[in-house]
Image (spheres, rainbow, N blue to C red):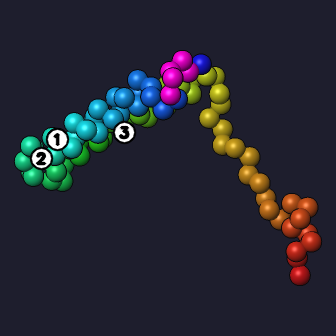
């Protein structure tokens, strides 16, 4: 249950806003070479994506849900699709 007065003000949203504002400030201070291919910024993106993948996988196992894909809905078998066939 969300106990915060405003639903969008959570610790996670405050952290994201802080990182965003810090990245704007660091963008002016860091040298341009940091943005090159295989530079520190790109490797930081790899680390963030890896951590996000690990958190997602651990959440999947903690909830006990199966990773099976959702059922596919075939539109040809829908009752309304038969009315519109030529």
Find the distance from the CA under tag 3 to the CA under tag 1. 23 Å
Find the distance from the CA under tag 2 to the CA under tag 1. 6 Å
Q: Nearer the viewer, mark 2 or mark 3?
A: 2
Which residue, given by chain and number where applicable, does mark 3 sit on? Answer: 49
Residue 17 appears at what percent x and percent y? 33, 35
Mark 3 nearby-residue class (10 Å; few <14, some 14–19, many ≥20): few
- Secondary structure of the residue carrying tag 2 is helix
Q: Please state, as top left, top right, bottom left or bottom right, where the C terminus lies in the image.
A: bottom right
Q: Are marks 3 and 1 in contact (CB under 8 Å)?
A: no
Residue found 12% across the figure and 47% down from its top: 28
Residue found 41% across the figure and 23% down from its top: 11
Can see residue 14? yes
Which residue, given by chain and number where applicable, does mark 2 sit on? Answer: 28
Mark 2 nearby-residue class (10 Å; few <14, some 14–19, many ≥20): few
Residue 9 vertical position relative to residue 70 in the rendered view, above or below: above
Q: Which mark is residue 25?
A: 1
Residue found 88% across the figure and 76% down from its top: 85
Q: Nearer the viewer, mark 3 or mark 1?
A: 1
- Secondary structure of the residue carrying tag 1 is helix
Is residue 73 toward the left or the right of residue 64 in the image? right
Q: Are marks 2 and 3 in contact (CB under 8 Å)?
A: no
Where does the magenta region start and end? 2-6
- Secondary structure of the residue carrying tag 3 is helix
Residue 84 appears at what percent x and percent y? 88, 74
Q: Earlier in the sequence, mark 3 or mark 1?
A: 1
Q: Name the foreground residue: 15 vs 66.
A: 15
Is residue 57 toward the left or the right of residue 65 in the image? left
Is residue 16 toward the left or the right of residue 9 in the image? left
């Amino acid at each position: 249950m969300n106990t915060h007065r405003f639903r969008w003000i959570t610790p996670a949203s405050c952290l994201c806003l802080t990182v965003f504002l810090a990245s704007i400030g660091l963008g002016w201070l860091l040298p341009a070479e940091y943005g090159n291919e295989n530079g520190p910024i790109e490797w930081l993106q790899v680390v963030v994506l890896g951590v996000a993948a690990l958190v997602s996988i651990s959440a999947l196992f903690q909830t006990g849900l199966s990773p099976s894909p959702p059922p596919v809905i075939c539109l040809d078998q829908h009752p309304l699709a038969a009315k519109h066939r030529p």
